[in-house]
Structures are given as structure tokens and as C-alpha cells.
Image: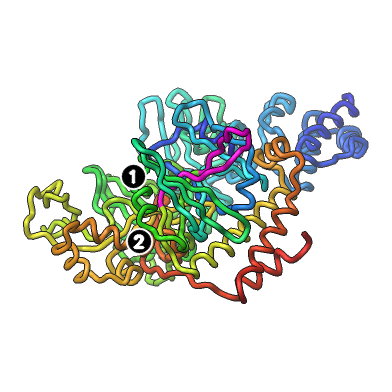
Amino acid sequence: MSTGSNEMPRREGAFEREPARRVFAGEIRECRYQFKDGEDEKSPTFVLLPTGERCNRIFLVGTLTEKTRQGEQNIFYRGRVVDPTGTFFVMAGSYQPEAMQQLAKIETPAFVAVIGKPSLYQKPDGAVMVSVRVESITTVDKDTRDLWVLDTAGRTLDRIDTFRSDTTPDVAKTKEQYPAMDPAVFHRMAYDALAQIKM
Amino acid sequence: MDFSEAAERISRKFSKDGQTADPKRIEGKLRRLVQEFGVQPSEAERSVTNELAKEYNMPLPGSAGSVGKTGGGTAEKKIAEASPGEWVTFEGKVVALSTPASPALAQSGIIADESGAIRFVAWAKANAPAMTEGSWYRIESAVVDEYKGVANLKIHSGTSIKEIGEDRALIPAPIAIKDLHPGIGGVRAKVVQEWDASHERMLQSGLLGDETGTIKFVIWKEPGREKLAVGGVYNIFYAQVDEFNGRLSLNLNGATILQEEADIPVSGGEGVFTGAIVHIAPGSGIIKRCPVEGCNRALSRQNYCPVHEIQPKFVYDLRIKGWLDNGEKTHSILLQRDAVESLTGIGLAAAQEIAENNPLGMDEVFLQMRDKVLGRYITCKGREIDNRVLVNSCELKKFETADHTKLLNRAGGAV
């Protein structure tokens, strides 16, 4: 999986879009390692999830609680999207004009669905942050949010199962990069997120 | 003969494949064959190896490499067991002959036994006797190699061919379409679609289906070849299964085709896909189509058809192109008018009204539809072709308490 794109150049017909992984804010917050797959300038960048899978794109649904417009020449928007486990930091700049217009229009608070690319950056004080560069953001209803929590809990548990039973290259990399990480934390997180949805 | 050494050699072949073959036991068998039955040592080694292979129910280990040791004999096997790099001896029936693609070849075609079929070529300089279609032959010491990713039998000057007088019954079992793999294969399938020929040498192309799936087929123009009837059910033997860009297709030119007076259920290739819509592509929403009969192409904003040029009397239509993502895999989806109307709640008339009266025109329809479906979970039914799902019907996924309970139980288990 990790070397696939190196061995076989992508052809037009064989193009596979990177799937959008389902990750809780509480997990994405723990990411500390990102890497490029391949040497090419256009090679995709991946953030390694502590549950043992790379992601280049994520899909998240939560409550947009805050948005701020920043910049003078280069306007960009920042927003906070809250899920049952924490907060995603999302941003859309002039390189994502469509996403920026979408974000600019939404009144907080609102349930939003976000498709975007996570990346790590370091704050001046040295702390590592994960922010999500928005590809698109739309307002959705509560049902969609609840479906996303189920979906994300299921996918998180799937990753933990793989992490515990299998040694994929990504799992090996995760054990190397996050030696102190205990997947039980994310198992618990998935349970707590599910428990917050009213029966 | 050094029995223990030979026994070690055999044992190693199997242990390589994860089996434990006791060298003591092998040595005993060899001794018995050679000393008690006067078998040639090389022949003894071969037969013990075969016996063990049968016992472990596995293909002969390294049989290509063992040729030298066993004194030039090649393993007798069934066609389905032959893999590239091996020397083989078998009995089979020539089920098809085709025009050789090169003057270096004397003959080419397909030879079959009850286990399967394989393409063969006979080199012109092999001076092999010409084989006739429909006859059985014993072929000794031919070589299996790989040509374009498919196993292929080479008849060379060291190959001996003997005709077998009797005609044995040979009825190959059809293979389920989803189980086909590159090589030679037969199916019992229905012609579910016929496509426009994309090449002047092409007689017919389309889609064949059975209960398990669908596959593209092609017939090239050749004397004696006839088109298949759409909706007809056919038993197709010895078709060539090709692979291109990871997708299989059937070339029926060398195949034996028998129509059947029956109807079979076809899966329709229809799959169910659930996920979130993560992208709506440009060209979605309301579009204009070329009104020329049989064209129906999408027009540009200037009402320009790539074939029929400016068409002011266009026809409006709705569609959504996008990506459906389940977190593991992303499918391109294409929704036609009915599916778009039911998913967005915007009918064609309403969309046309917006397109003609809103200052943003057609863009406004795109934006309204995008805001209604992007980021939503939907379940689509449709046919998958080339990682693109042509959606026949779709609906928004609903929150099911049962799913919630199941996940809670799963997550509540051992933490």
C-alpha cells in the first residue's frame, strides 16, 4: 500500500481519489507525524493517525461554533468545528475560493459537514497543531451529524482492530512514531461519542 | 543412489512451502521403490515427490527446476495446474484454431482438457504435425510461458505430439463472471447491452451478465463470426479473457458459442453503495443537451455540441456528477434526472425556472443542489463501471437506532 504509487505511475483511467477518513477531533489532535508518499513535488502528504492509518483527506461533521476572518491582502477564514470528542480547527484561504465563500456564508452555530485536508504546523510556542484546510463545507442537519458519529466510531474501531491484529506498513509506522500511544484511549473515545447521542 | 541426500532434497521442496515432510519417511519410500521394485532412481524421486504433492494437495513444488534431475521427463498434469515456467505433458483437445499472428508461427489456437483451457502456439521451425480442430492429442514436453500476462503453451522442436484416436467427452463447466481471470474461460451469460462499435474492425461489443456480475465482450470482424442477439442467453466456451487497466473483458473470436432457449437472472451488475457525498463536480445541476436524435450530448454554455455545433433548440436535463466516499474507497457517481429530482427535491421545471430567471442562471441550480446534497450520507443502487457508479436510484441514509445500539455494544466491549 505504501509503495503502490511509487511502483505504478498513476494513469488517467486508474486514478483513485484519496478516500476521506473518518476521524474524531480527539484523535486528530494527537497527530504528530506527517510524511510525503513519494519524492515528487505533487506527491500527496499524509498525516499519520495514532490508530494506525495514514490520511490525506478527512470528512467531518460537527458544530461550527466560531469563525473569524483574517488577513488584509490575503483574506482567509478560520473556524472551530466541535464534535463529541473535541474541536477541529478548520481554515479556508484564497486558494480555496469556493470553500471560503461557503464558510463566509454560514452563520454560527450550525451543523456543518467539512471535507478537507489535515496538516500539521507548529505554533510559535512550539506546540504542534493540526488544522484542516477546507475543500468544501456545507450546513447539514442533526441526522447527518449523528450518522457521522456512528460512521466515525465504526471506522475508528475498525482501525483499532487492524492495529491490534495486523501489521500493515502504516501500523508499523505508527508504533514507531507514537510509541506511547494506547489504542484503548480511542476505543473509549468512540464509546463516549456514541453514548452522547440520545437513544 | 544416495537415498538420504535425495530424501533431503524432496523434503526441502515441501518445507519451502510450509509443509513438513519427514526425510526418513521419504527415504523409506525411495528405498522401497528402487530396491524392491527396481525403479530408476530419478523416476523414484519423481514419483515420491508427486505422491507427497498429492498428499498435501498442492501443485508440484519447483517442478520446472526438477526437470533436469528427473532425466528429461516432464510432469504430466492438467491444463488448469500448469503455470508459467513449467514443462508440461498432457492430453487435450484442440477446441479452436486461429490465424497465426506471425509467419514464425505454424499454428495458434486453444487446447483444452476437463480442467481448463490454454492458448497455444506452435513455432514454424518446430516442424510439429499440424493439429486439427476437434481432435485429441497427447502433447509431451511443451513449455508454458506468459504472454501479455496470460499463460500460453509453446510447442517447440522438442515437443512431441501424438494424436489420440478416440473422441472423449469434454464439456467444460461455465465459470461465474465474477470468478473469471485472465486466460481462457467460458461463461453462461445473457447479452444485457450492445454498444456502438468503437472501431471499424469491430463487429460487436457490449455487456454480458450472469447472476454474479457483468463483463464487457468484443467480437472482431472475421469470416464466419456473427453478432449475438441482445437479450439472448449463450453458452460460451473458450473465450479469451483479457485484462486491461485492471478490468477484464471477453474476446469471443476464438470461442465456441451456443445459444440457449432460456432466460437467466442477471445481477444487472447492480451494487449498493453507501457513503458521504464529498464532492459535486462542475457540470452538475441543470444542463443542456443536444436535440439531434441519438446524440443527447451535453452542450457548452454557448449551446455548442461537439458534433452538431450550435443547437439553439436544446433540451434541459438534470444530472449530478460527484464522489461518494465511505472512508475506505471513493467512487465516482453519476445521477440521472430521476435520481437528482428525488434526492434534491428540485424538479426539472423548477430548475429551469431558476436557470432562466435567477441572475446566476444555471450556476444557481448548481449551488442549490450542492448545498442540498454535499456532505450528506446517501445509499445508491447502480451499476459500477470503471470505478464509476451509474446510479439508478438513491436515497438519503436515515439514522437507525439499531445501528447505534450495535456500535455501542461493539465499543462497550473489551476496551
x%, y% of residue B347? Answer: 25, 71
**Residue at 57 percent of width and 53 percent of height:** A87
Report if residue B247 is visible in the image. no
**Image: magenta residue range:** A118-136
User: What's the residue at 49%, 69% (across, down)?
Assistant: A142
Q: Residues within 10 Å of mark 1 (few under 14, many from 20)?
A: some
Q: The residue under label 2 is which amino acid type?
A: Asp
Residue A134 part of the magenta-drawn span: yes
Figure check: B381 above or below B151: below
Please name the predominant secondary structure of the magenta segment in the image: strand
Looking at the image, residue B304 lies above or below residue B275? above
Q: Which quadrant would the C terminus of chain B be assigned to in this image?
A: bottom right
Residue B310 covered by magenta stretch: no
The residue located at (67%, 48%) in the rendering is A51
On the image, the x and y values in percent for residue B291 come to: 12, 59
| B332 or B48: nearer the viewer | B332
Crowdedness of circle 2 by 10 Å Cα count: few (<14), some, many (20+)?
A: some
